[in-house]
Image: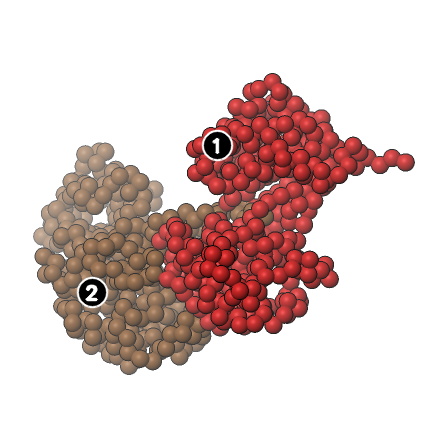
Chain colours: A red, B brown
Amino acid sequence: MNIGAPDKLDWLVGDGLPEVRPLRPYSDAALEFLGGLSDALLRDRANRAFPDVVTFAFFCRRANASRLKNDFGETANRLGRGLAFHITPSNIPINFAFSLVFGLLSGNSNVVRVPTRDWPQVDVVCRAIRALLERPEYEEVKRRVALVRYGRNDEITAYFSGFCDARIIWGGDEAVTAIRKIPIPPRSVEVTFADRFSCCALLAEAVLGLDNAGLERLAAAFYNDTYLVDQNACSSPNLIMWLGKNIRAAKDIFWPAVERAAAKYDLEPAHATGKYALLCGYLAGDYGIKRVTRHGNLIYRAELDRLDAAESLRGLFGLFFEYDATSLRDAAKYVTSRWQTLTYFGFDPAGLVSFVTDGLFGIDRVVPVGNALDIGVIWDGYDLIRTLSRIVSAG
Amino acid sequence: MAYSFDEIAKLDPYGTGRGEKAELYARVLSELTSSHYARCAGYRKILDAFGCDPRPTRSAEAQFMLPVGVFKTNELSSVPGSEILKTMTSSGTSGQAVSKIFLDRENVRAQTRALASIISSFIGNKRLPLIMLDTALVSTDRSMFSARGAGIVGFSTFGRDVFFALDENMRPDVDAARAFVEKHRSERILLFGYTYMIWRHVVRELAETGRSLGIRDGVLFHIGGWKKLKDEAVDRGAFNGAVRETIGDVRVHNYYGMAEQLGSVFVECEHGNMHCSVYSDVIIRRHRDFSAAPSGERGIVELLSLLPTSYPGHVLLTEDEGEILGEDDCPCGRLGKYFRLHGRVRGAEVRGCSDTYEYRRAG
C-alpha cells in the first residue's frame, strides 16, 4: 500500500497512503470517531497540562459535532473531494489536529504533515488517535487517516501534492508561496492560510462601566487572546483601537488589569530582549509611533498617531500598538485583505459585521475579546467544510 | 568631540577605579547620547518615543540602552554617508539578519588605539613574533574574507614575523611551526586564533599525534565564543590545559567583543575573570524590568563603550547572559568591573517566530 511513497518520513499514524473513497460531510463514522477521541483525550488527566489539547477535545465532543452538523444543513448531496493533503504550521502545536478534523468532517481521506518541532501536544494527540484506530469500530476512519512528519523536503511535498484532491497550506506567506510552486492536479482545490493581521476594538465607556470582577474577566480574556500564544498567532490582536469617550481613563484601568492578568506569563530573558529590539526597530522606522508606555517588560504599548503603516507592525510577547479612533470609519480605509480577526468589547457585533460588509477588503472574523484563537469550521474567511467537499446538483 | 579621547587613551586601561570611572562615564556617555541624538534620526526617534531627554548628564546606569538587535533591522548612522570609511557587518548566528555598523575615520582610529592599549597592557609595547593559529588563506583569499579575516588582519599589527600555523586544508604544519618556535626560542611568542578553530584544528590534531609545538614562553589571545565547545563539554579549564599540553607554556587570554563595539574588548586575566577596561563597562539587567542587578546576580548583559562616535552604539543591551563578579578587587590587580558570561539569553528558541524554515504562522 505504500508503493512509491518516499522513505524519508515518519508515519505517526497509519503506515501508508490512506484509502481514497469519499464520504458525505459529517458522516456518522467521522462523528463517532471524534466523540471517541474527545473522550480519550479528556479522560487522560495528564492532558490537563495542555489547555490547547483540552480545547481541541471539547471541540471534538459529540454535542459540538452534532451542533455543527445541524448548522451545516443538508449533506445528502455533498461528499468529500477525495484525498486532502494538509501542511500544518509548526508554531501552533494543535492546529494539525484541527486541520485533520476539518478534513474528516468534510468527508475526505487525509494525509497530514504534522509540525517538525517536538511539541508534546503532537505526541499526546497522535498517541490517542493511534490507540483509538486500533479498535474495529473506527475502521472506516482508520483507512482514511495518515499523519506524517518530515523536515523540509520538496520531493515529499511534491509526491503527496501530485495526487491530492485538496491541499491545505497553513503557515503564512512564505510557506504558501514556496509550496504553491509545487503543482497539484488541475481539479484539485487549495486552501491557503497566509499571514494575517488582527486587531481589537475597545469601547472606552464600556470598559469604564465594568465593575472590578468584570474588568478582571476582560483582562483575562485579553490575556488568552494574546500572551497565551506569545501573540504569535495571526488571530492574536496587534492593534488595539480605542473608541468612545474618556479613552484615557479607560486605558488607565484596562492596562493595569492586563498587567495583573499577565503576571503569570513566563516572560523569558530572550522574550524581553527580542521584544525590546522589535519595538526599537519599529520606533526608528516610519510607522507613526509617537509614544511608548512600558509596564515593566510585561507590556509595551506603542501609541500610533496614524494607521497607514499599522498592518506591517507585529507584536510579540506583549507588544501592542494602540490607536485612539474617533470612529470606526476612521480605520476603514486602512483595512486591507490582510486583516483577519476583529475582537471587540462594548460593541454590538451586528453593527461591526455590517461595518465590514459595507465594502471592506479585509476582516473575516468578528468575535468578542477572549475568542480570538477559537478555531472553527469557518476560518480565515473560508467555509472549510463546503470548500473541501463537492456538491452534486440534480434537477 | 567634547571629551578628549586622546586623554583617555593615555591612561592605563586598567587603572581607573570605581568613583573616577562613574564620573567619567556619566560625563562621556551623556555627551555621546546627546551627540547621537542630534545626528542620528533613528536614534532620536527612539529616544523621543520613550520620552527620554538626551540633555542632562546621567549616570551610566540611567543611560538609554539600545538593543543590539536594532542594528540588524535598521541602519543607524551619526555621520553623513560621505564620511563613512567602512561598514562593518556581522553575521549573527540566527539566519540572515546582519548587523551594519557605520564607522568614520575617527571611530576606526579610536577602535584601533583602544585595542592596542588593551593588548599592549598584557604583552608590552614591543612587537613579538606572532603565530596565527589559522590559515593564511583567511586573510588573502577574498572568498574567505570575513569577520574572521578582519580579526586576523587587525591582530597582526601586534606582532612581527607572522607565521600561519595551519595550511590551506586547515591542518597544522607542525614541522614549520616548530622551526618558527626554535628560531625565536629566546623570545616571548604571541599567538592568536579563534577559540573553536584552535580546539578543532590545533589542539585536537596535535593531541592525536602526541606532538607539541614546544613553546617555552608564549601568550595566546583567543576570541569567538564557547558555544561549539560547550556542545563538546569543553570548558575553560580543559581548553587551557589542552593548549598547554599541545602548544607549550603559554598564558591564555580569552577575550570578548562584539562587532557592534569593536576595539573596547574584554580580556580574561590570569584568574579567569573577564575585565572591563577604561574604554568599556558592563551592567547586568534583570529581564522582568531591565532594572540593574547587583554583583553575583545573573542577568542580561548591557555593554558600555566610550568609542562609538559615528553610530549610536555606546550603550547596548546584548542578547547574552552574564554576571558581575566584582569591581576593583580582582587579585590580578586590574581595576574596573570583572564578570563572567553565560552564553545566549535563555529561551532564544521563541515559540513560532524563529521558525525560519517554514510555515511560520498559523492562521
- Res B127 seen here: no
- Camera-side residue: A347 or A390? A347
The subunit letter for the residue under badge 1 reads A
- Res B193 seen here: yes
Amino acid of disc 1: Val
- Camera-side residue: B123 or A47? A47
Same subunit, labels 2 and 1: the answer reads no
On the image, the x and y values in percent for residue B130 come to: 21, 54
The subunit letter for the residue under badge 2 reads B
For label 2, the crowd category at 10 Å Cα-Cα, with few meaning under 14, some 14 to 19 and many 20 or more, is: many
Q: Secondary structure at mark 2?
A: loop
Please report the residue visible at 58 percent of the width from the left and 70 percent of the height from the top.
Answer: A244
Please report the residue visible at 40 percent of the width from the left and 51 percent of the height from the top.
Answer: A265
Q: Which residue is mark 2?
A: B277
Q: Which residue is mark 1?
A: A124
Mark pair 2, 1: CA separation: 53 Å
On the image, the x and y values in percent for residue A391 come to: 79, 37
Q: Secondary structure at mark 1?
A: helix
For label 1, the crowd category at 10 Å Cα-Cα, with few meaning under 14, some 14 to 19 and many 20 or more, is: some
On the image, the x and y values in percent for residue B199 come to: 26, 43
